[in-house]
Amino acid sequence: MQDIHNMSQLTSADLELARAFPEGFLWGAATASYQIEGGAFEDGRGSSIWDDFSATPGKVFQGENGNVAADHYHRLAEDTELMSSLGLGAYRFSIAWPRILPEGRGAINNAGLDFYDRLVDGLLAKGITPYVTLYHWDLPSPLQQEGGWVKRETAFAYADFAEVVAKRLGDRVTNWITLNEPWCSAYLGYGIGIHAPGVQDRQAALDAGHHLMLGHGLAVPRIRAHSAPNSQVGITLNLAHVYANDERPETQRDVALADAFSNRWFLDPILRGHYTEGFFEQLGLNAPPVQDGDLATISTPIDFLGVNNYTRLLVKGNTERIPLADQVSLVAPIPSACYTEMGWEVYPNGLRDLLLRLTKDYAVSKLYVTENGAAFKDAWNGNGHVSDPRRVDYLRTHIAGLAEAIQQGAPLRGYFVWSLMDNFEWAEGYSKRFGIVYIDYPTQKRVVKESGYWYAGLLKAFNQAH
Ligand SMILES: OC[C@@H]1[C@@H](O)[C@H](O)[C@@H](O)c2[nH]c(CCc3ccccc3)c[n+]21
């Protein structure tokens, strides 16, 4: 591998940017189990809703699935060495619930726990801090057969699963993320059905969202009970700052609706202990099945908020009708703007402004950017490295926004680029590449992209400054 630390990719401004970050700032990269592991039928792993969804014709691009993915299940040593060569301070990964409890509850598959044991020990041996996401969408199929997240019982099954993992890893893992993006699990999975389990029922999305948050709240004390005293537990939400396209009253109204639906649906219960006033009415739906004590459980204190952010929302008020909160019209693509392969506008200030809003409006003691990155058309000609200048620029400009946010008071403690490596991009299959490392799937070769060299150089410059 080319000398990864030659920092040749960095400008003098980049070196200055690295020095702008405070001592102890954590630099990492993130992945998720179903997206990189493969080994889908090995060592007792059970089926997940994403195995089922991928096997359903028409759901995933070209019928692709995570059976092999980036074959990470068989490449722990190679991939932890790759992380170390990049100079990562931390690595965020998720636990595949079906590897641990193939039936979702009950019998424990120790071979599954052994895999994550090996991963954690490999990371610690290289001085890389593990950040463990307990749930990144791969719900065991038997639980979905009982109704999945629309059923309250699933919240309790999740808390039991979290405890099983904490009991095994809690002596070495001190950074826990209960859920990745319950908004996606609830709305994409149960509301509009473009993600697993493919349910199209907006009321089900509200009910699932409630039980996901309940599972989070039930799990927090169970994780704490089996982790070292200096451990920290948080949750990761996908959030986006909402901007008004104009000053019209309809636009101001729709900005509030979009913010309620995209951000406050989960922020308010978890951090304020109540749903947003009028939220269910704004959706034209009933309240989810809230029971006494649920909101107290859901808002149990957490140590940090993980923020996944990729773009912004730009809202233009609809004058003809009063839209429902999840039907606010966003502004169409702007000719002067840049977009990623996902169709997401590249708008670096959106991450900065989001972090400052969270700091101003919510009493979060610590923030981590647990995902930020971009998919662009990456190509590899079979030798040399992969040129991805647009991703270098995306990372450079978004990371510059982090430095501004910190200077303006955001309690930001770390940043995880999405993603360490190209992987299974859900319904888009392998057609979208987010990695700072290219995966040549036919050979499973790992090829560090220009952005990987750039990121490694930034981390080296940061370490040299402290
Ligand atoms: O789409 C890139 C990544 C996924 O690969 C991660 O698994 C997931 O945590 C994640 N979240 C977001 C933002 C929310 C979103 C996800 C998927 C599709 C549309 C929006 C982007 N990403």
Image (tube, grey):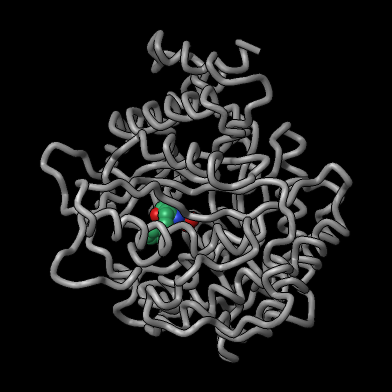
Q: Quadrant of ligand 1?
A: bottom left
What residue is at 56 percent from the left and 62 percent from the top?
A: 136
Viewer-nearest residue: 52 or 207: 207
| Total tally of numbered discs in the picture | 0
Nearest the viewer among 277 and 125 is 277
Specify the farthest residue to the left.
335
Residue 330 position in % (x across, y down): 23, 57
Q: Inspect this view and state whether residue 425 appears.
A: no
**In the displayed structure image, the side of residue 392 where residue 290 appears, left or right:** right
Q: Nearer the viewer, residue 343 or 77?
A: 343
* Residue 143 higher or lower than 428, as above or below: below
- State the residue at coordinates (46%, 78%): 205
Residue 110 as seen in the image, left or right of residue 366: right
Residue 224 locus on image (x, y percent)? 83, 56
Seen in the picture, residue 15 relative to 92 is either above or below; the reply is above
In the image as oriented, which residue stretches furthest toward the top?
12
Q: Quadrant of the C terminus?
A: top right
Residue 242, given in percent of the width and then of the height, sits at 35, 49
x, y percentage for residue 435? 42, 43
| Front-lying residue, 164 or 270 | 270
Residue 21 image-quadrant placement: top right
**Looking at the image, which residue is at 50% across and 42% down?**
420
Q: Is residue 351 visible?
A: yes
Judge from the rendering whether residue 328 lies leftward or rightward of residue 195; answer left or right. Answer: left
Outermost residue, front direction?
A: 249
Q: Residue at x 87, y 47 (%)?
A: 228
